[in-house]
Image (cartoon, coloured by chain):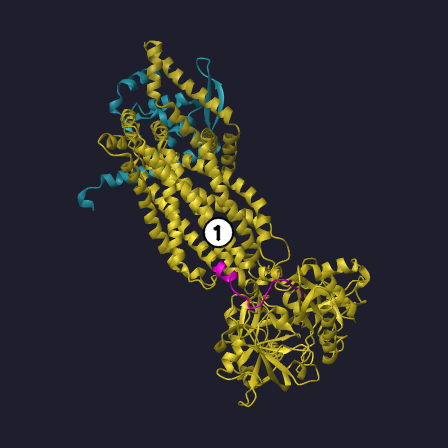
Chain colours: A yellow, B cyan
Amino acid sequence: MKPLNRLRSWLRAVMQRERNEREMDAELRFHIEACAHDLVQLGVSRDEALRRARIEFGGMERMKEECRESRGAAFVQRLTQDLILGARMLRKSPGFTAVAVLTLALGIGANTAIYSVVDAILLRPLPYPEATRLVRIWESHPSRGYSRNVVNPFNFLDWRDHAHAFQAMAALVRSTHNLNAQGQPIAVTGLRVSPEFFSVLESPPVKGRSFAADDAVPGHDRVAILSYELWQSQFAAAPDLLGHSIEVDGLPYVVVGVMPRGFSFPTTKAQIWTPLPLARTEEWKDGRYLSVIARLKTGVTLGQARQDMARVASIAAEVRPDFDQGWSAEVYPLLEDATQAIRQPLWVLLASVGFLLLIACANIANLLLMRSTGRIRELAVRSALGATRWRLVQQLFVESLLLSCAGMTAGLFLARFGLPALLALIPQSMPLPRSEPIHIDGRVLLFTFLASLCTAVLFGLTPALHLSRVDLQNALKEGSLRGGVGGHQALRRGFVVAQVALALLLSVGAGLMLRSFARLIAVDPGFQPEHLLTMRIFTSPSRYADDLKRSAYFKQLLTELRNIPGVRAASSTQFLPLTEMTSGSCFALVGGPTLTPAEAPSSQFLIVGTNYFRAMNIPLLKGRDFEERDSFSSEPVAIVNHAFAHRYFAGQDALGKQLRVCWTTEKPVEIIGVAADSRQADLQAAPEPTIFLSNFQAPMYFATFVLRAEGDPRQIAHSAEEAIHRVDPDQAISDVQSMRTVVNDSVASPRFQTVLLAAFASLAILLAVVGVYGIVSYSVSQRTNEIGIRVALGARSRDIARMVLREALTLAGIALAVGLGASLAMSRVLESLLFEVQPTDSPTLAAVACLILAACACAAVLPARRASRVDPMVALRYE
Amino acid sequence: MPILLAHLGEWLLTKDKQLDLLQGTLDMLILKAVSLGPFHGYGILLRIQQISKDRLEIQQGSLYPALYRLEHQGWITSEWGESENKRKAKYYRLTPAGVRRLDAETDNWNRMADVIAGILRTKPEEV
């Protein structure tokens, strides 16, 4: 009953404010008049009686305030009051408000935009039930430094059967299929998965069924599950498609299921899933190429799973020492694994915008402090009228809250319109673990709201607390105002030092990234990317099942492509350079000791077409290119790169030497050429020892054609596709792009980081310059009197300017020391993002320090000029 | 009424002989005064002065906040009425909850007073 009563009273107090106030007035007036009335009865004159009654009654306003408070409505009323007052104060100084809101909007907007990306990629759980229990399992070879190696099928089968930590485990291989549902062959991305795949993800199809164990039995594996999107686009969402067969790679596959809309695997946006019929047969014995995922049993920790896998992997190493000696297994959370490459850069970016917001806060705190000096009198008057210290802090803080709310609103607008631009900057290659687009949603809004609240506390509370501590009674006395409020100066300088130091920190980061990026794009890839067109095909296994057929098919394709007018040279490669794809194989020198696969050295290994080195413009240092005469039936040949020859045949002639490559075990291959080094997986990694084999002799199922054009490579794209379709009209073609585009895309991620960091650093410097300008010009205006005296005593304007500049540069100097110290302390954070640049790179540090110093000097020049022109007469009269 | 007036006169002249009100007792006194019948704020003040024979000093400034607080807590309730000299005035009355509260406070106070008086009466040899 009582709380209800109190609530009702409180609500009445809040809602019926006007009436309550009127009644309170009437009641108090009645009291005074009744008292005066009684005094008149005692013989006092009416005027005197009223006067005495009022004195006896005491401070009316203060009592009213206490009455309001005892009703419990005071807080809300005061808040409304403060809000109105705050809004009025902000409107009265539009310049200050505009600068503050804009600064905050930049800080909050940048944070919102970056956070929405970070949240969508790194923080949000993957879109599967209990996704935190999903893990990725890799093979590892600690002594060779491989921590994430794809998995051998036999090992996967052993793991699946013997590990205890997992509820289910599945293997998958990426594939590309030729689908011809609408008269035009298209290449669709597929995943060949072991039947447990969908139960590991606990994601059943929306129509039909998922794979059962029977589907992975060879001969019964012609079944497929389609993505919702493929079903819609290629099969017009036909409801009767289930149970019917579709043609995939020229073979009939029965559609058994359709996945829900938007379903995808984090690292591969597959459109079709087919079974992977794994068995302990010769076919699956060798090689490592499976991706393995698993779901932890409820209650099993990652640590336990790692122990379990180490145990199981050691058993495999004992059973098959030839193949598994030295190999082990690693378990990582699936989300962490899928986002591993961008985790660090994204956190760095989020930290950078965080710093930017801190700088903005310091800036506004300083603006508030400067402004508040002019408000000391106002506050002193309010304090004299009975406002408590807490009450003044509250009022000042509400003003800050208003500012930060305005900043938040403007910032959200900035983020709303800036996010698409930011997303456009995100490279295609960045592994987004979800298919839904990134946007500003409830989670992001909550973050923005909390960030704004924090900023209000950061920039509002310090000045408010500081100001309320000032001796306001003294402040009321004339004269003491001009001297300023001593303590403020130190606090303001602290803020400026902090923001310049933060700006330096960000600029060092941006400088290092710029330098690193400049080095990266200056890297000579070893081939000539201009005038080069690339396109990928995946042959239908059914049509070109045996090696001879495939070899002939590729030969025919290359002949057609070379006949296109405007094509100077054409060839193919298993993996296009700079697409983060490569393969490796163990090998042995013929005549050397016999070694097991686990003991043998391993090198990078690529299968390329005839005239590959000519088409790519990679110089051949010795010997010759692959030619037509190196056919399927002739003696197998190989070309090695300079790094290989240097490592394994130092001081000898590599030509004519023979190798046994594990990939093709039948016959040894003879080295017929040594090519110059070129970059394969990416621009960053130094060229590795590489063995090249001819695609005519060891034909792959897939290849990327490289065509050197006389002019713009895009102009021959159409005729190249036609040429391929002349040989096989059902051959799907994908990834038609110029090599220049491939090169640009390969550095898209560092470019993204560099561009953003540079933008944030520029903003940070701008804000810091505003901060330095503010404090120096304020200090000059405070010292006008002193400067006047100095001039009167004979100081030249040059001396005065120097004095002002010295003040600014002292602050900048302290900030540089702090900022450089912080940069060195945080250097490890950037280390992994940098290419051939040390995070302590002294030229960068020096250049950035000079830049910041110059910026601070520029910021101080205007106030210094103003100071040097002070007229002593005016200045002295001023006081 | 004349008695009250006389009190007022005395009170206004003899303030230095008065005791300061003990912290927290004003609420209790107001409840007691209001329990004797509906009063307006000024009347409550006079009534307390009268009962205490002017030995208590009540800050007028603290009376109204206390009244508002008690009303907010639901122990007293108020309504507008007419004063002796035909003016609109706000009259306070005890609610049933207020009656219980006053009883409890009175009990409490008596016990406390006994205990404290007992302590203060203690002679050295008794310890």
State the image quarter where residue A727 is shown. Answer: bottom right
- Mark yes or no: residue A690 visible: yes
- Mark yes or no: residue A281 visible: no
Which residue in the rendered view is the most extreme toward the left?
B125
Magenta segment range?
A: A516-534
Direction from residue A183 to residue A314 in the image, left or right = left
Q: Secondary structure at mark 1?
A: helix
For mark 1, does the 10 Å Cα neighbourhood hold few (<14), some (14 to 19), or many (20 or more) residues? many
Given the image, what chain letter belongs to the residue carrying mark 1? A
State the image quarter where residue A544 is shown. Answer: bottom right
Q: Is residue B12 above or below residue A210?
A: above
Residue placed most toward the observer, A782 or B45: A782
Name which residue type carries label 1.
Ala
Residue at point 35%, 17% (across, down): A53
Residue A560 in percent (x, y) is at: 74, 70
Question: Is-magenta flag for residue A448?
Answer: no
Q: Residue beneath label 1, please?
A: A758
Residue A607 in percent (x, y) is at: 63, 75
Question: Is-magenta flag for residue A522?
Answer: yes
Residue placed most toward the observer, B7 or A69: A69
Direction from residue A167 to residue A830 in the image, left or right = left
Residue at point 48%, 42% (across, down): A104
Q: Is residue A271 above or below residue A665?
A: above
